[in-house]
Image (cartoon, rainbow, N blue to C red):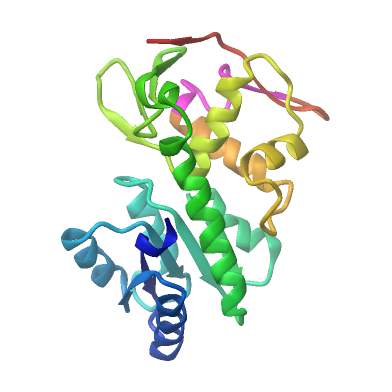
Amino acid sequence: MHSAAHVVVVDDHGDIRDLVKQYLEQQGYRVSAADSGLSLRRIMERQTVDLVVLDVMMPGEDGLSVCRQLRTTTNIPIIFLTAMVEDTDRIIGLEIGADDYLVKPFNPRELLARIRAVLRRAATPVNETAFQHSKVARLGPWRINMGRQEIYGDDGVGIPLSTAEFRLLKVFIERPGLILSREQLLDLTVGRTADIFDRSIDNQVSRLRKKIEPNPKQPSIIKTHWGGGYSLSVEVGYE
C-alpha cells in the first residue's frame, strides 16, 4: 500500500525538494529529503527506502553517478527529475538503470502518478504468485532468483537487476523463443503508461545484455531480429 512507502527526494534545490516532500506527504507517503548522493546513502544506511526521486543536475556527484552507484548494490526504483530536453539525453537515464523520468518544470500530480505506477510495477514480482517466490529460473549459464530479482553465475555471486531490467527479463523468460516487437515489449513491461520512447527498449536490452551475455557485442541469449524485435534464444528451466 502506497501510504507505507518511503520515498527519498534528492535535489540540491531546497525549494523543489521541500515542495515535493510536502506534496507527497499530503498524499500519505513517508518522505525524506536529501541534498546530495551522500545524504541519500546516509538515509539508506538507517532506513528502508522504497523509491528515490533523483535530480540529475546536481553539483559534484550528479544524479547519473548516484544512479550508477546505486545500481551496483540495489534495485530500488529510481525516478529522475531532469532539465534535459533532448530525447537521447533523457534515455541515458533509462539506459543506466532509472525506471522513469520527469522533465522540469513538472506538475506534482504527474510525479505522483509516475511514483504510483513505478511502485506498482516494482511490487509485482513480490506480490504476483508463489511460483515467482519459490522458483529459480535457469537461463543458459545463469540462475535467476525471481523473488530477489538477482542473477547468479557459476561463482554464486548475486548481481542485482533494476526493476526495469527484471521486468524485461521476466517477459522474455515467460515467452522463450517468441519474437517480441518493441511495441509488445513496451506494452508488457510498462503498459505505455509513461512517456518512454520505443528505442528505449533497445537501450534496456543492451543494458541487460551487458549483465547476461558472454559477449554483448555478439549476443547469444537475447537475439535481435531486424525489423522484428527480440527473442530469448536459450531454453528456460526451473528449480
**In x, y percent, where is residue 182?**
74, 37
Q: Seen from this angle, which residue lies furthest right?
A: 227
Is residue 214 found inside the magenta-colored segment of the image? yes
**Figure check: 82 above or below 137:** below
Residue 40 drawn above or below residue 168: below
Residue 235 coordinates in the image, percent (x, y): 55, 8
Q: Position of residue 56 (x, y in %)?
A: 47, 70
Q: Residue furthest left?
A: 46
* Horizontal arrangement in the rendering, residue 137 relative to residue 83 (left or right): left
At x 74%, y 47%, the residue is 198
Q: Residue at 70% x, 59% y: name it.
A: 195
Q: Where's the C terminus, which quadrant?
A: top left
Residue 98 appearing in the image: no
Report x, y in % for residue 1.
42, 55
Give, as a single range, the part of the protein colored magenta: 212-224
Judge from the rendering whether residue 230 lies leftward or rightward of residue 70; answer left or right: right
